[in-house]
Image (cartoon, rainbow, N blue to C red):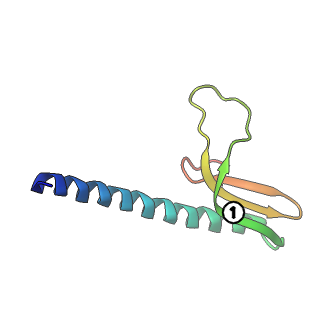
Amino acid sequence: MTGSEILVVIIVAGVLIGVWIFLQQKAKTRLQQIEQETGSQTVLYKDRSANFFGQAWRGYKQVRGNGVLLITREQIMFHMWVPERN
């Protein structure tokens, strides 16, 4: 590998690590938000990296993706990481 190829690999790795850190922080923040919404309800299950596919068709700009899932006896809540959507 040449010096420029190594530099590109380092830059790409840095960007990927930065995105990973951002998403982990976003997941932590969204989980804290959703836990506050539940109040004193007993949490049966929570997942910081759930995939959401079940929504009505919103056209080609529809985003499905990762978010926080929290299940209590009274409700099921899912909050996407980005964009912040409930």
71 or 53: nearer the viewer: 53
Q: Tell me where residue 21 sits by quadrant.
A: bottom left
Residue 5 x %, y %: 17, 52
As drawn, 41 above or below 66 = below
What residue appears at the point 10 percent right and 56 percent down from the top-left corner? 3
| Tag 1: amino acid | Ile
Give the residue furthest to the top. 59
Q: Position of residue 37 (x, y in %)?
A: 73, 64
Q: Residue at x 15, y 55 (%)?
A: 1
Q: Residue at x 68, y 64 (%)?
A: 47
Residue occupying the far left of the picture:
3
- Residue farthest right in this picture: 73
Q: Position of residue 72 (x, y in %)?
A: 83, 65
Give the labeled residue for mark 1.
34
**Left or right: where 11 falls relative to 3:** right
Secondary element at image label 1: helix
Please state if 71 lies on the left or on the right of 65 as rendered.
right
Seen in the image, is 84 located left or right of residue 39? left
Task: Indicate the quadrant where residue 31 lies.
Answer: bottom right
Q: Nearer the viewer, residue 34 or 23?
A: 23
61, above or below 1, in the image:
above
| Image coordinates for residue 8, horizontal then vertical, percent | 21, 52
